[in-house]
């Protein structure tokens, strides 16, 4: 009986994947948006923080 019940479940999963593939299908649908990132801007901001900072660290 176990194999018959497993087959019944597998058939139902297969039928669901064919009737509603977005919900029950095996394929993943991914949406990717393209947003360019400016690394140069981030590096310039980091350099300004380092070189414009007037604080000094005293070694003891």
Image: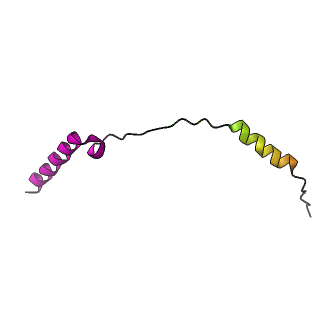
Tell whether position 30 is magenta.
no
Quadrant of the snapshot with the N terminus: bottom left
In which quarter of the view is residue 20 placed? Answer: top left
Residue at 28% from the left image edge and 42% from the top image edge? 25
- Magenta residues: mostly which secondary structure? helix
The x, y position of residue 28, in whole percent, is 36, 41
Q: Is 53 placed above or below 43 here?
A: below
Residue at 77% from the left image edge and 45% from the top image edge? 46
Q: Nearer the viewer, residue 6 or 27?
A: 27
Task: Magenta stretch: give its range.
Answer: 2-28
The residue most toward the bottom is: 60
In which quarter of the view is residue 36 placed? Answer: top right
The x, y position of residue 50, in whole percent, is 83, 48
Q: How many numbered circles are shown? A: 0
Tell whether position 4 is magenta.
yes
The x, y position of residue 29, in whole percent, is 37, 39
Residue at 48% from the left image edge and 38% from the top image edge? 32
Q: How is the image coloured?
A: rainbow
Q: Nearer the viewer, residue 14 or 7?
A: 14
Residue at 57% from the left image edge and 37% from the top image edge? 35
Quadrant of the snapshot with the C terminus: bottom right
The x, y position of residue 19, in whole percent, is 20, 41
Q: Is residue 24 left or right of residue 49?
A: left
């Amino acid at each position: 009986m176990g194999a018959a019940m497993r087959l019944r479940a597998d058939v139902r999963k297969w039928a669901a994947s064919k009737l509603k593939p977005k919900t029950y299908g095996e394929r993943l649908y991914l949406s990717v948006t393209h947003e360019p990132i400016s690394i140069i801007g981030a590096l310039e901001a980091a350099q300004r923080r380092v070189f414009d900072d007037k604080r000094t660290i005293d070694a003891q």
